[in-house]
Image (spheres, rainbow, N blue to C red):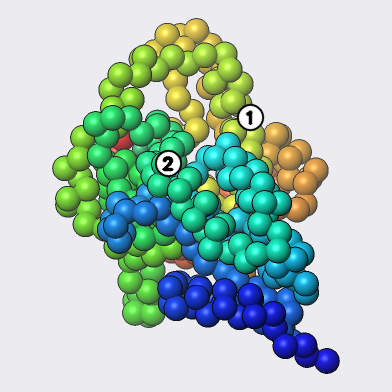
Amino acid sequence: MSETLDERITDELEALEAILLNDVVIKAVDNMPIFIETVVHPSTGDDAEQQYVCVTLGVTLPPGYPDVRPDVVLRNPRGLDDCLITSIKEQIRDKLDECIGQPVVFELIELIRENLTESNLPSGQCVICLYGFAAGDIFIKTQCYHYFHSHCLASHLIAGEKYYKEEFEKLPNWQQMQAPPYQQTCPVCRSQVTCDVETLKLAPPPMESITAPPFCLTAELKALQLKMASLLAHQVAKGGVVGAGDDGPPPLTITTAADNEDNEATNASPSAPPEAAKAGAVNNGGAVNANTSNEAPSSPGGRQAYRGPYRGFNRRGKPGRRGRGAQR
Ligand SMILES: [Zn+2]
Ligand SMILES: [Zn+2]
């Protein structure tokens, strides 16, 4: 029982396809409902390099549209904070009220685009250094619309490649032949990226890292260290490989000279066995990256982990799991 589509809808769909071309996906199930999806970018005169934000708009046209409101969702926001998303959603709601009885998809795209154009600057933090983006910072947007200080991304990629090579060297020849080549990945979504590290490296460190007050190990930070240390012990006990077998100081412990004199106990080693055993017994779920086929389980109460050449190689392509070695 397929009704013929309302002319208002066919006109709208034709126009969407004609104007957005490959940037719009329109799916229909027995004429209705019709699902429309498109990624909205700020207007930058077609200069994609200058687009720092985007969001995917999904509109479902129910039977009865446009006399019935469509369902609208926003997905995969990039570079937009929650406040702005909430505000755009409110504006969409108002627009839908206003436009009942007439096609509204173009109006929605326009409304979102205006908002994105006004906010076309990275907001939030660089996830690598956790500093914000300040005037004078040099930053880069990846193909997946995540952005970082160029300086930070360079350090991340250098550390990632170094780690890959280290792990690669440990493999027997036959596995080296089969191993996929090193590939740069986004530290947020792990999409493949292609960046010129040599150029990125030339960028200065983030402004806020220069102007920030000197580091101070507060009580709050010490408490956090203890918490993280026990999480690490839990991972090690469960066969997780983060930090296991590393020589040198535990990766999650930052101390100052004064702190060392002050209290040896706060410098608790993450390998503390009783805690690890206890944590392991309590929680059976959520084992992090446990590679049970290759890695012998740790012996009860110890951090005895598999130390052979395969250890940890399943992490390749996921650089940055341990912060050590990254130049800040
Ligand atoms: Zn940064
Ligand atoms: Zn990404």
Q: Is residue 36 above or below residue 107?
A: below
Residue 130 lies, in percent from the top left, at: 43, 34
Residue 46 placement, left or right of 82: left
Residue 55 lies, in percent from the top left, at: 51, 55
Q: Is residue 35 above or below residue 236?
A: below
Q: Amino acid at mark 2?
A: Ser
At 83% from the left edge and 92% from the top edge, which residue is drawn? 1
* Residue, far right: 1
Q: Quadrant of ligand 1?
A: top left
**Residue closer to the observer: 168 or 83:** 83
Q: Which residue is mark 1?
A: 227
At 73% from the left edge and 45% from the top edge, which residue is drawn? 280
**Residue closer to the observer: 198 or 277:** 198
At 57% from the left edge and 13% from the top edge, which residue is drawn? 219
Residue 258 lies, in percent from the top left, at: 42, 9
Q: Quadrant of residue 249?
A: top left
Screen quadrant of the C terminus: top left
Disc number lying in front (2 or 1): 2
Q: Gap in Å between the C-alphas at discs 2 and 1? A: 37 Å
- Disc 1 element: helix
Residue 166 placement, left or right of 34: left
Q: Inspect this view and state whether residue 47 appears.
A: yes
Q: Inspect this view and state whether residue 56 appears.
A: no
**Residue closer to the observer: 121 or 207:** 121
Q: Amino acid at mark 1?
A: Lys
Residue 253 placement, left or right of 87: left
- What's the mark number on residue 162? none
Q: Which residue is mark 2?
A: 119
Q: Earlier in the sequence, mark 2 or mark 1?
A: 2
Q: Quadrant of residue 322?
A: top left
Q: Residues within 10 Å of mark 1 (few under 14, many from 20)?
A: few
